[in-house]
Image (spheres, grey):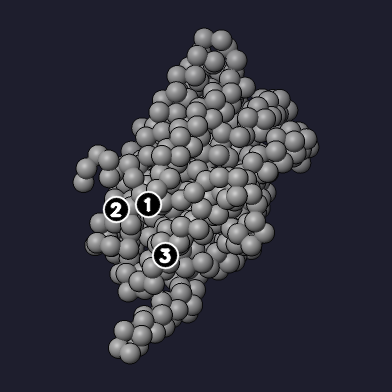
Amino acid sequence: MSLKSMFSAKDMTQGSPWKRIMEFSIPMLLGNIAQQLYNTADSVIVGHFVGDNALAAVGSASPILNLLLALFVGISTGAGIVVSQSFGAHDRQGLSKGIGNCISLTFVATLFIMVFGPLITRPMLNLLDTPASIIDWCADYLNIYFLGIIGFFFYNMLSGILRGLGDSVSALGFLLLAAVLNVILDLVFVGVFNMGVPGVSLATVISQAISAVFCFMKLMKMSEHFDLNKSTVRLEKAMAMRIISIGVPSGITQAIMSMSMMVVQSLTNSMGEMVIAANVIIMRVDGFAMMPNFSFGQALSVYTGQNVGAGKWDRVQKGVRQGTIIAQSFAIAIVLVILTLNTYLFSIFTETQALIDLASEMMNIMAVGYIAMSITQVLGGVMRGCGDTVTPMWISIATTVALRIPIAYVIAYMTRSAEWPNGHPFALSISLLASWVLGMIFSVVAFRLKTRKMIRREMETQKLREAA
């Protein structure tokens, strides 16, 4: 593969399915890891330069941040599906309108969050019973992030468009550059200028804006595939509604997951700063451990979308089988690494041995769940690529709201003691593991009853057309 072809749009309707999936997934995986470095660098640097309370503050802000960003992330998912299907069908007009409307929707969403976000920051922190020792830091972190949200929104949307076109390498390069810049700015703002928690938020905002600019410049160099002008950028009701209708269920899924995290965060906060900090460390490692699952899920979504657009349903079926095998292999390897090295991984964030021990014990409980999540993400990606974002939404609601929250609170209630008056921290890990395993079961059942039948039906129809 030439260097030029690596940084160009890719047709995933040709060639071996597993090769196309891997070519697309590996750059995306590296890109997702680089993006995770944003928050991880924040946690590591404030943990070492400021202290464990600052580490807890950054983590406590995450559920609120994720809640407000969830709907937009869903819309960007819808954008990627619309782009991949139009690209697979070689529909230049549909592709042009899809990209133009994505850019306009992003601009509208940016204005909304910049105005609305800072207004609800402190009320939400109070609602979650955020400890007084960290609430001011949490508020400062969130307000800076919301006011500079334009970089995050446009990077995610534009990189989603690039991935829909089959180009996951360019977004990776820009994100790696931004990740390095983020670490440098973190060290400067926190280590040199002593800006504390607000410093890491400012560093992230600046870095994301730079990655968005590079994504836009790259997209402008791919004009052989689409047209971007006043006509295509103008919001068109039919196209905007198509993007939103596909993306909103994914956004609702993200929002519900974030809301459940906020409810569980309230339980976490009641257990004290030590548990908050341990949970932050776990979630940072979890972010990396989950990246292959998310990457293969996104890859299967784009792969499926392009092949659905091209009417190549036999390739969709092959992609499901081969993608599942690849994802499972990565997940098993990750579980082995976590079980072997988690103590060393957690020591990166803090030197407090009691904190490291607590986080390690909680992580050991969760570890096997990554294997279950690999199946959930692959099957969910295929469903979304086929245009069905509603089924994964309902599965998420069932597992994160109807199951995880009650399980967490029941276990916490049953494990109250003199040492843990509000419940044992293991309640957080056990409830998460249970939701992941049940999510896998629901995804397999839904895929077999609905999506697989549709794929086979379309394959039979295609064979009849070819025979006629």
Q: Can you say which quadrant of the picture contains the C terminus? A: bottom left
Please, what is the three-letter code of the amino acid marked with disc 1? Gly
* Residue at x 58% of width, y 23% of height: 202
Q: In the rendered image, which residue does mark 1 sit on?
A: 166
Please, what is the three-letter code of the amino acid marked with disc 3? Ala
The quarter of the picture where residue 328 lies is bottom left
Number of the label disc, if any, that sits on residue 293: none
Please, what is the three-letter code of the amino acid marked with disc 2? Met
* Residue at x 50% of width, y 28% of height: 210
Q: Is residue 30 left or right of residue 144?
A: left
* Residue at x 21% of width, y 46% of height: 1
Q: Is residue 359 left or right of residue 467?
A: right
User: Given this view, does label 3 or label 1 mark the residue nearer the observer?
Assistant: 3
Q: In the rendered image, which residue does mark 2 sit on?
A: 22
* Residue at x 41% of width, y 33% of height: 174
| Residues marked 3 and 1 touching at CB (< 8 Å) | no
Residue 349, relative to residue 29: is it above or below?
A: above
Q: Is residue 282 left or right of residue 233?
A: left
Packing grade of label 1 (10 A; few <14, some 14-19, many >=20) is: many
Location of residue 9 in the rendering, given as x and y in whole percent from the top left corner: 36, 49
Location of residue 255 in the rendering, given as x and y in whole percent from the top left corner: 63, 52
Location of residue 153 in the rendering, given as x and y in whole percent from the top left corner: 58, 40
Question: Helix, strand, or loop for circle 2?
Answer: helix
The quarter of the picture where residue 244 lies is bottom right
Residue 455, relative to residue 76: is it above or below?
A: below
Number of the label disc, if any, that sits on residue 89: 3
